Image (tube, rainbow, N blue to C red):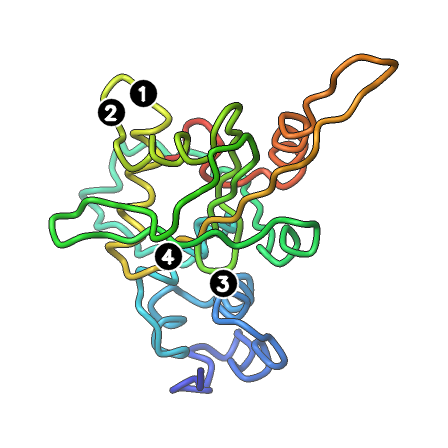
Amino acid sequence: MTPVDMAAPSATLPAVADVIDGLPTASDKIRALGRAGYSRVDIAKALGVRYQQVRAVLLAAGITGGLRKPRASQAINTPVEPPVALHTTSWEVLLRAGFRMLGEWTQGPEGAIQLDAQAPAKPGVYAFVLDDGVVYVGLASHSLRARLDGYRRGQAGQRTNVRVKRRIAESLAQRLRVKVLIAMPTPTEWCGLPVNTAAGLEAGLIRKIRPAWNIKGVA
């Protein structure tokens, strides 16, 4: 994607071309420009992408700069919350480790979401990828097919399913791709005792990469 405006909007900022030189993906460029101090509007104009895409990538990366300034009337008595420290990990890290691409979430004309592939009816670990960053990791203790179908239904009372379904639908409405990766690690033993490697993999990934949608309190 070719930037449409290579000049910096301010003399204090580096030129766009210098910031994004050699970066392979749009997300890499968005994050680099965000860290360099560019506003979200300027990033969208420079890269020729949607503002919503810029916002989603920067929020997932924990880059909260570049927000539109509120009007004075809005700023009065408005509590300021500290930004949530989020991290992004490229989905290629999981692919190299043994995860495989299953499919993508899609959205119908009435807003219903569905998976464009059928998952195996076996236990495993799954990951949702927004653009090229891992945003959610989960465990299917019995069946990946049934677990992923739970997000499609998003039944009331199942808070996690409802919350994540909403995040998927919002991302699709912004024309962002939400891909699904899966892995089915083989159970093992320790001193003759069974070890659930899938559960350990899920817990280890969440602890290490802190996917944005796994963090409680993040809308």
Question: SS for tag 1?
Answer: loop
The mark that comes first in sequence, 3 or 1, is: 3
The mark that comes first in sequence, 2 or 4, is: 4
- Residue 48 position within the rendered picture, expressed as x and y whole percent measured from the top left: 35, 78
Which residue is tagged 1?
A: 158
Q: Which mark is residue 19?
A: none
Which label sits in the foreground, 3 or 2? 2
- Which residue type does callout 4 highlight? Arg
Which residue is tagged 3?
A: 34
- Which residue type does callout 1 highlight? Gln
Residue contact at pointers 2 and 1, CB within 8 angstroms: yes
Could you tell me which quadrant the C terminus lies in?
top left
Question: SS for tag 3?
Answer: helix
The mark that comes first in sequence, 4 or 3, is: 3
> Could you tell me how far apart the alpha carbons at marks 2 and 4 are, in whole angstroms?
28 Å
Residue extending farthest to the left is: 110
Q: Nearer the viewer, residue 70 or 54?
A: 54
